[in-house]
Image: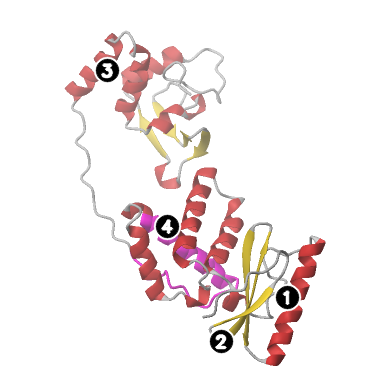
């Protein structure tokens, strides 16, 4: 393949890739490609040059369409859509309903797709390419995370099928085995008693004692204890409803399968009642230790 001709600023270059015409240019620091899906003939060159001039005029006028939908040949989205473009569109579609923590997963996966697929088209990704990506990504992240990322790609392609941008889903049969981990051995009652007593007796960490006892007595996650509000407890504090969590400065609802009710021991019930004021705000944090957040 001949060396690429460097395009002047604001210029769209017509080039030949695998005997097909492609437009290449940069705009505001980002590189763009548009596959014309036309063989390299005199007539098709003229068509491509006309499209190139149109894009140049739009960039100059400040009305450039970054999605490129305005410039694609009719009915050609599947043939000209890059892998990274498709997943970016899917991420944009999901953004309005995503928690910032979840959005970070999409953005991280987009970066991996860019590293692996580069400028590869969606139509060039079959089951073989999908399996290669799984193997490549599996060397960089844990199996349980890999399974989640493949699930996102599967959802992306299913969404694109509904949009009629793709005809098949190469990720549907890509499986990820997650080795089962041995569950940690729980503390005995005697061990729990010694741990709590140790916190109560410590001059520096005694203010954590109730918090630690609540964690050990309920088996809840750290973020669930931190996000606990008085409305999550029933009137006599005998039952707690874990429905929220706190993570990286954000409160968020738990997944349906994590939402649960837990009965509390008489000791924990007494501890919570002692902390609750007579005119408590239901939305106030319980704060099982001072300065929790």
Q: Which residues are magenta?
A: 146-175
**Badge 2 local density, few (<14 within 10 Å), some, or many (20+)?**
few
Real-space Cα separation, disc 1 to disc 4, in angstroms: 37 Å
Callout 3: helix, strand or loop?
helix
**Mark 1 sits on what residue?**
52
Q: Quadrant of residue 74?
A: bottom right
Label located before the other in sequence (1 or 3): 1
**Mark 4 sits on what residue?**
149
Compared to residue 220, the image places residue 238 above or below, namely: above
Real-space Cα separation, disc 3 to disc 2, in angstroms: 73 Å
Question: Which residue is found at the position 76% from the left and 69% from the top?
Answer: 56
- In-front residue for pair 191/121: 121
Label located before the other in sequence (1 or 4): 1
- Percent coordinates x, y for residue 53 in the rendering: 77, 75
Question: Which residue is found at the position 34% from the left and 14% from the top?
Answer: 205
**Mark 2 sits on what residue?**
19
Real-space Cα separation, disc 1 to disc 3, in angstroms: 72 Å
Task: Let me know if residue 167 is in the magenta part.
Answer: yes
Callout 1: helix, strand or loop?
helix
Compared to residue 80, the image places residue 209 above or below, namely: above
Callout 4: helix, strand or loop?
helix
Compared to residue 73, the image places residue 65 above or below, namely: above
Q: Quadrant of residue 89?
A: bottom right
Give the foreground label among 1 and 4.
1
């Amino acid at each position: 393949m001949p060396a690429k001709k460097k395009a002047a600023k604001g210029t769209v270059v017509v080039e030949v890739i695998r005997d097909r015409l492609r437009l290449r240019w940069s705009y505001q620091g980002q590189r763009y490609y548009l596959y014309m899906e036309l063989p390299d003939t005199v007539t098709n060159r003229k068509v491509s040059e006309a499209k190139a001039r149109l894009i140049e005029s739009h960039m100059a006028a400040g009305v450039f369409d970054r999605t490129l939908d305005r410039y694609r040949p009719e009915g050609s989205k599947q043939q000209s859509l890059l892998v990274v473009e498709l997943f970016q569109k899917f991420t944009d579609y999901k953004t309005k309903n995503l928690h910032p923590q979840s959005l970070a997963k999409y953005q991280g996966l987009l970066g991996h797709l860019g590293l692996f697929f580069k400028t590869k088209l969606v139509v060039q990704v079959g089951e073989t390419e999908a399996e290669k990506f799984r193997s490549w990504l599996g060397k960089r992240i844990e199996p349980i995370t890999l399974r989640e990322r493949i699930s996102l790609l599967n959802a992306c392609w299913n969404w694109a099928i509904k949009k009629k941008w793709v005809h098949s889903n190469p990720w549907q049969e890509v499986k990820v085995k997650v080795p089962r981990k041995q569950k940690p051995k729980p503390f005995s009652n005697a061990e729990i008693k010694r741990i709590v007593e140790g916190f109560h007796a410590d001059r520096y960490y005694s203010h954590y004692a109730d918090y630690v006892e609540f964690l050990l007595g309920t088996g809840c996650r750290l973020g669930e204890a931190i996000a606990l509000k008085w409305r999550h407890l029933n009137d006599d504090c005998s039952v707690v409803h874990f429905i929220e969590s706190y993570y990286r400065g954000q409160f968020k609802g738990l997944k349906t399968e994590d939402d649960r009710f837990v009965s509390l021991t008489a000791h924990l019930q007494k501890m919570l009642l002692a902390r609750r004021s007579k005119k408590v705000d239901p939305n106030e944090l319980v704060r099982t230790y001072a300065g929790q957040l």
